[in-house]
Amino acid sequence: MLFDALFVPKTLRDAVGGVGWVQAMLDAEAALARAQAAAGVIPPSAANRIAACCDAADFDVEQIGEEGRRVANPAEPLVRRLRERAGDAGEWAHHGATSQDIVDTAMMLVAKRARTLILAEMDGVAAACAKLADDHRRTAMAARTLLQQAVPTTFGLKAAGWLVGVVETRNRLDQVELAAQLGGAAGTLASLGDKGVAVLRLFAAELDLAEPPLPWHANRVRVGELAAALELVAGACGKIALDVTLLAQSEVGELSPPAGGSTAMAHKRNPATAVVAVAAARQVAPRIDLLGELERAAGAWQAEWATISHALGYAGGAAAATRETLEGLEVDAERMRTNMQPVVAAQPAASDVFVDRALEWYGR
Amino acid sequence: MLFDALFVPKTLRDAVGGVGWVQAMLDAEAALARAQAAAGVIPPSAANRIAACCDAADFDVEQIGEEGRRVANPAEPLVRRLRERAGDAGEWAHHGATSQDIVDTAMMLVAKRARTLILAEMDGVAAACAKLADDHRRTAMAARTLLQQAVPTTFGLKAAGWLVGVVETRNRLDQVELAAQLGGAAGTLASLGDKGVAVLRLFAAELDLAEPPLPWHANRVRVGELAAALELVAGACGKIALDVTLLAQSEVGELSPPAGGSTAMAHKRNPATAVVAVAAARQVAPRIDLLGELERAAGAWQAEWATISHALGYAGGAAAATRETLEGLEVDAERMRTNMQPVVAAQPAASDVFVDRALEWYGR
Amino acid sequence: MLFDALFVPKTLRDAVGGVGWVQAMLDAEAALARAQAAAGVIPPSAANRIAACCDAADFDVEQIGEEGRRVANPAEPLVRRLRERAGDAGEWAHHGATSQDIVDTAMMLVAKRARTLILAEMDGVAAACAKLADDHRRTAMAARTLLQQAVPTTFGLKAAGWLVGVVETRNRLDQVELAAQLGGAAGTLASLGDKGVAVLRLFAAELDLAEPPLPWHANRVRVGELAAALELVAGACGKIALDVTLLAQSEVGELSPPAGGSTAMAHKRNPATAVVAVAAARQVAPRIDLLGELERAAGAWQAEWATISHALGYAGGAAAATRETLEGLEVDAERMRTNMQPVVAAQPAASDVFVDRALEWYGR
Amino acid sequence: MLFDALFVPKTLRDAVGGVGWVQAMLDAEAALARAQAAAGVIPPSAANRIAACCDAADFDVEQIGEEGRRVANPAEPLVRRLRERAGDAGEWAHHGATSQDIVDTAMMLVAKRARTLILAEMDGVAAACAKLADDHRRTAMAARTLLQQAVPTTFGLKAAGWLVGVVETRNRLDQVELAAQLGGAAGTLASLGDKGVAVLRLFAAELDLAEPPLPWHANRVRVGELAAALELVAGACGKIALDVTLLAQSEVGELSPPAGGSTAMAHKRNPATAVVAVAAARQVAPRIDLLGELERAAGAWQAEWATISHALGYAGGAAAATRETLEGLEVDAERMRTNMQPVVAAQPAASDVFVDRALEWYGR
């Protein structure tokens, strides 16, 4: 889509887009078949055959979506097609599973793949902050509180403050437990008899996802945690980008971020990547409703899919644009110095002990 | 995308999708050229040439999005390409306008086109409610408050209540003023000299959009009103769909909405379209930030584009799924009667005076 | 509460606070009794006795709240006490009504009383904007887009833009229909027999509230509309206050809003009222859930009471602080002129035709 | 306030209310004075005198709030009064600190005190869930997915699922780092010279709060984490309460929560505490804006105070009402058995292996 292309890097768009989701659902089906073969629940040859059919390129994403409308989930049409493709082995596909097992597991896989990309961007943001903090530990400038000049700070200390927020939120996202989902029709795994727990363990291991204490069809805490972590990641990036736009104001001019042109004014140097970062960040406000009905919610669960996909994409988009902003940033130390009002410059100067603390904390 | 295909009807997806937006931006450029030709600002031949180049099929949506990242809006790359295509006339394309003029006007056109589709769905929902209200004005059933049986009501009165909410929100959406945007570089229209107001009027008329009192680059009230109206529309539909899922519960069984199958349980009849309606409705919670900086916001404005597109699509998706639910609804009047607890059935029965009031109010 | 005292003017705090609510519930009970006496449903003497007992000063707000926890609404303990106070007439108090009739009607009364205060503040904001627009129609300054100087505008045109947003949102709030609620146990008014509609009409007239087509226990559209209108009002005010903080920056200095001191820095002049306005505005984001269950929601309805009270208070607080900000604003026209970069000042100047349009539109 | 009294237990209301906040600000001032005395920055006798004046009972909460409006924070009027009360020692009160140091630290203290109460409620909820899980590990009932009967589960497994969500969110809240704030005028601690870090450490230790790597005036991640954790806690409780209201429906009748009466219907047993829990939970959706300007936000920070106070109160209110609901719950095992449709009862039964897993996980 037009705006996804503007706000979200291509690799991340692919990871959270329709093909990414279909592949993740197929990966879940393949892993389920392999896990059940390993547990002796289905024939190994059937598992191999199923797994061989699990390439998203062979499926029509839009058609799956449209047919999914009739059953309120995208797994049913996908499984139907997978079974057709797998021929005799098809009867063993999706064995003992319910649609939510596949969709939830796919959501975790999509999140895992997107998270890797987002964390890489956040690491880039953190590295850029750390370099600025170190390089500018003695670059004096006015601190502004309530947008008024207050006392002297350093640009290094400002960047150190950004760094802490970036690392805190990056770690929060990294710590969200992404777990496999396998509960069968209603979270009891009854259809797998006494092999349920073994299959769950193998299934999770196949996908390198955590093994949850219970199926979590109706316990959406981890989805809520993921959503919250993405909002924090976006917020930490948006904070940096906002500061950059403020320090790049015509009347301040202390920072020059990478600029884009204007269609109307040749002289303008718009802080485009910083604005993209702020706008992407402001779009990350996912609402996950934990109040779903009984063993499977009639609406709240289904509302998660697009919401989480969007939040992953735009949080990563905010991180990428913030990294680009910082990597291309020009710092005008002279302007920082001369902008300080005399009454401000006369206050006690910031030492760089806090910069050291932040860098040490970051290095841990 | 997978989930857009599941939640949003095809015509509406097209209206709010990338091609729909690019066409709307091109329509704005064509109308601008024609308006300026009519006002004597640019040569009529140039306007004709520009207008002839304004077919979205000739533009690469994803490329425009990706290039838009460098300038924080999609109009700049689009205008660049349009000028190339228009040859000598290209210099007159986008004359006196700023990117926001085109993007905002396009957003209004996208909203206008999508609104037509949404209102048609809402009219279908209202008609279905009215029919149910009239048909079942004497079909007694238990009213439930706090999910406990309370006193008798009729299914007709329940449907009349749905009807009122649907019509109220439909009208609210219909009344949102969608206005052209034309302010030039910073909302002063200075580059058009004393022809600014005339061009604004012609431009709005070309597009059948309202003429605003002032350019509204920095006044996002109408966007906020649109967002709020979409949330209300979705809510009125979601309310109906929620009621249907509750009355379709296995233990209640008074309503049978169109059903989808389960991948795990052959006996189940899931209320799929009702669930799609609830889920679509719950995803319509657009946040429009009116607190944008000075003459053009550095982030808040840019965050509107995808937000409004999504809200239009999912509000319409909620309406469509609710209409499908009601049109395929089976009402079990006998079950309604026998479900009533004796203590409830013994209470005074609802008359149908309120049904008449609602139908009369609807007919106005 | 500490923060309500900081953000919300005293009269408005009182209107939306506990005493204001208890009085509104009592006003609803008194009006109900009078309406039923007029309709011949209850004895006039009983109505008089009941009405005479409806003074909030005689009730313990905190106790009503705490006892309300046991029944999930504050009307039940209030009615119990009212009946005790009314002696023999007590049996006629709350006749044929349900708790929601009283709480919803009280919410409408609270909203009506608070709205009068909010609209008065908004009128003050509008008048201040109009004066600034007129006084400064020729005061040239730099327009800033994406926080970069763009082309010249005038401070009058900026104020005219504020004015339009203020009037649009003020009118939106003014147009929200506040209606009486009377439906009896489950919205059928069955317990009043064929007098239901007559009593509803008299009840609404007693309170100067609109008469709705149907009882709206389960149709929360008007509450959603009220919430949306309050968010828009707050947003239009917050936009102004944000602009003021930006133009009051140490490096810009074009506006001097009323200032508060700092506990740490004697030299600082913090734009305190503007910050209060922004902060109040940002707290107005009421979420009204239209998806309530069947004839009375089990949670969504009960979540409205504090939400609407808070939104009324803080929207009004934002308006009041914005009015104070504008009424105490000092404009430095010389600084506006000299701040303009040469490349900006060389662009075509804004005419004041748009200021005229806005003032004319305002005067209508 | 009326609704706080309905939704929030008294001890928690006190903890997050005006007196709680004023006491927390005073505790911060007292701790600051003691820390500075210990570090040799101010005279020990002055610290003692200051600390002796830090009793909220001696301060007028409403007056502090109203005066705080003039400076956009409540610390300035509080400090002014504290200095008056402390006589000669007053000049040493608030030494080297800025208002935000005191307000942020107070927010952390309020959160810490409220968290203790909330965690105790959550422990009660968890214990009730665990008991139900253990007692009913063999109590068969229908699992419902999309509100349709699916396959058999046990009430024990359902309660085990609740338990996991409660413990996960309880732990998430418990793990949020609540840290002291001390940065001086703009986060540099420059006014304390080389004693800044030592005072920060002593200050944090005095209050039993964490010592942050840097002052976090402009890094609001921990506030965002707190808000997110509270929303999750509320959601986990609301999920339980919603399930209870659904299983207590007249037509289901498998659970009987503590009931409240109706003002209109003598026969009704409303699931009042469950509804209070759902309604309280739905009101916990705090929005913390991480995008604050430069060294101290002009609006976003000030919007946190009431938001966090409200979220603490209502999350705790949701937990308390859920605990009350579960502790008074009657389980009708016979109804659970007979409600199962034959086609459901004929499916494989849930084993209790997952209940064991959940209880073991809980016991760790």
Image: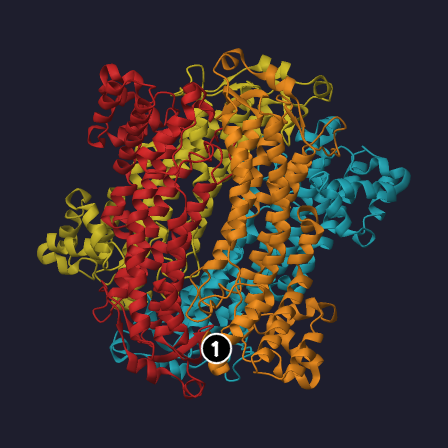
Chain colours: A red, B yellow, C cyan, D orange
- In the image, B91: left or right of D332? left
Q: Which residue is mark 1?
A: D189
Type of the residue with mark 1:
Leu
Q: Residues within 10 Å of mark 1 (few under 14, many from 20)?
A: many
Picture quadrant where residue A151 is located: bottom left
Picture quadrant where residue C342 is located: bottom left
Picture quadrant where residue B358 is located: top right
Q: Nearer the viewer, residue A141 or C247?
A: A141
| Quadrant (top left, top right, bottom left, bottom right) of the N terminus of chain D | bottom right
x, y (%) of residue B250? 54, 19
Label 1 is found on which chain of the structure? D
Q: Residue at x 23, y 66 (%)?
A: A328
x, y (%) of residue D313? 62, 52
Secondary structure under the numbered disc 1 in the rendered image: loop
Q: Residue at x 41, y 57 (%)?
A: B220
- In the image, D179: left or right of A210? right
